[in-house]
Image (cartoon, grey):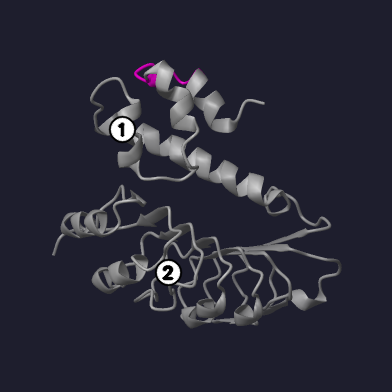
Amino acid sequence: MVTIYNDFIKNHTNYDFFDQEKVKEFLDLPIIYSLDSILPAFSREIGYNEIMNIRVILNYKYREQRNNLYPYLAASLETVVSEFFVNLFGDKSEIIDCTKLEGDVKKISLVACRKCEKVITKPNLEMLFIDTMPKMTEIEGLSKLIDLKDLTIYRTPKFNNFDDIKVLKNLLFLNLDNSKTLVNLDFLTEEHNLIFLDVSFCPNLNIMSSIEVLKKLKNLKQVNITLKKKELELVLEALPNVYINSNKFKKEN
């Protein structure tokens, strides 16, 4: 069966610079990996635009890994309700109580619920996706979701209780993109099993203290992060075996 990224390479004319004898070796590498580790797979020196295209492949590989490992977590966000998945888009409630949802729900997606101030979680969740919730300040029960593998808290400018993540040791995918209240990553420890972390566009994140935290995450394979150029050098040096996706820098002071 042809995978997403195999098909992408096969049909994308920009990838004729691949050494075809090494393509299989390249695709057999771990799903998420450092960009430096794949450069030997190319038959010539590659430029900036080609590196950007390679990042697209890495993202395809990441998404496919996510789906293959947890297929029941990969339901389309267009789905409203299924046995395992519930999606609420534009719900107008001030409190969203997920404990009222019937069935063995494993994945919950809450998007653009702009009036919601509080989310009450449902036990046994393995994925929680929260996007564009400008008034939300509380996720009740987050610290009790010990089976959670995939957590997104995105565009929630008033939420600041990231400490609850400290006990979520089984998390594999964590997306805190666009979290204005995120100032450090001290809630992550060497006991976490994270392989993917997104802290892009978190303007108040202390990068220097975050580097020390990231070095403790032994399973980490990819970090999406917004950096200044001088910070990027430090991150690359500290995390040589992690793919660092930083394609937009903060303006220098």
Determine which quarter of the picture holds residue 199. Answer: bottom left
Q: Nearer the viewer, mark 1 or mark 2?
A: 1
Residue 178, given in percent of the width and then of the height, sits at 42, 64
Q: Which residue is mark 1?
A: 39
Q: Is residue 147 visible?
A: yes
Query: The residue tagged with tag 1: helix, strand or loop?
Result: helix
Q: 245 or 119: nearer the eye?
A: 245
Q: Is residue 148 above or below residue 221?
A: below
Query: The residue tagged with tag 2: helix, strand or loop?
Result: loop
In this rendering, position of residue 120 left or right of residue 54: right
In this rendering, position of residue 231 left or right of residue 147: left
Q: Which residue is mark 2?
A: 179
CB of mark 1 within 8 Å of CB of mark 2?
no
Label 2, residues with CA under 10 Å away: few <14, some 14-19, many ≥20: many
Q: Is residue 136 visible?
A: no
Residue 58, given in percent of the width and then of the height, sits at 45, 40
Determine which quarter of the picture holds residue 107. Answer: bottom right
Span shown in magenta? 11-18
Residue type, numbered disc 2: Ser
Residue 200, given in percent of the width and then of the height, sits at 38, 59
Label 1, residues with CA under 10 Å away: few <14, some 14-19, many ≥20: some
Quick one: which residue is furthest to the left in this view? Answer: 253
Q: In the image, what residue occupies the spot 43% across and 72% down?
A: 190
Quick one: which residue is furthest to the right in this view? Answer: 103
Q: In the image, what residue occupies the spot 43% across and 58% down?
A: 220
Q: How many marks?
A: 2
Q: In the image, what residue occupies the spot 73% across and 75% down?
A: 122
Q: 20 or 84: nearer the eye?
A: 20
Residue type, numbered disc 1: Leu
